[in-house]
Amino acid sequence: MIRSDKKHMKQKKKPERTCIVCRKKFEKRDLLRIVKDKEGNLHYDPTGKMNGRGAYICSDPHCIDKFMEKNLLNRTFKTNFDNEQIKNVKDEILENFKAVSEEDMK
Ligand SMILES: [Zn+2]
């Protein structure tokens, strides 16, 4: 019986973040990012480069749905955002998400 020694595995360190809905880890670039800036405003950040504290959601439609139903942002950022702000961010994400998945639906 031949046993192959475990080869020295080259570990590529890709930045990973946890989806705030399903709590699974994903590569940062596969996640949607929401940022709370210094003024305490929420933004959807498609570039991933905005300054501030970030929260991440994976692009699984179930996670998007849950995110839309629940108010996870207050919990994640330990902040009470006003509903208007949360709604705006959710709208931005929905728009972006729909643009990708349902191109011809309006
Ligand atoms: Zn998720």
Image (tube, grey):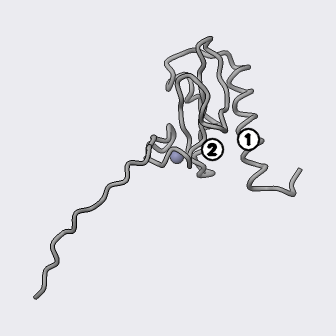
User: Which is nearer the eye, 37 or 93?
Assistant: 37
Assign a secondary structure to mark 1.
Answer: helix
**Residue ID at (52%, 24%):** 53
Residue 73 x, y percent position in the rendering: 57, 26
User: Which is nearer the eye, 33 or 67?
Assistant: 33
Crowd rating for badge 2 (residues with CA inside 10 Å; few <14, some 14–19, many 20+): some
Left or right relative to 52: residue 3:
left
Q: Is residue 73 above or below residue 58?
A: above
Left or right relative to 70: residue 11:
left
Three-letter residue code for mark 1: Leu
Residue 97 x, y percent position in the rendering: 72, 47
Residue 83 x, y percent position in the rendering: 69, 19
For mark 1, what is the residue? 94
Three-letter residue code for mark 2: Ile
For mark 2, what is the residue? 64
Residue 85 x, y percent position in the rendering: 70, 21
**Residue ID at (13%, 85%):** 2
Q: CA distance from mark 2 to mark 1?
A: 8 Å
Q: Is residue 35 above or below residue 9?
A: above
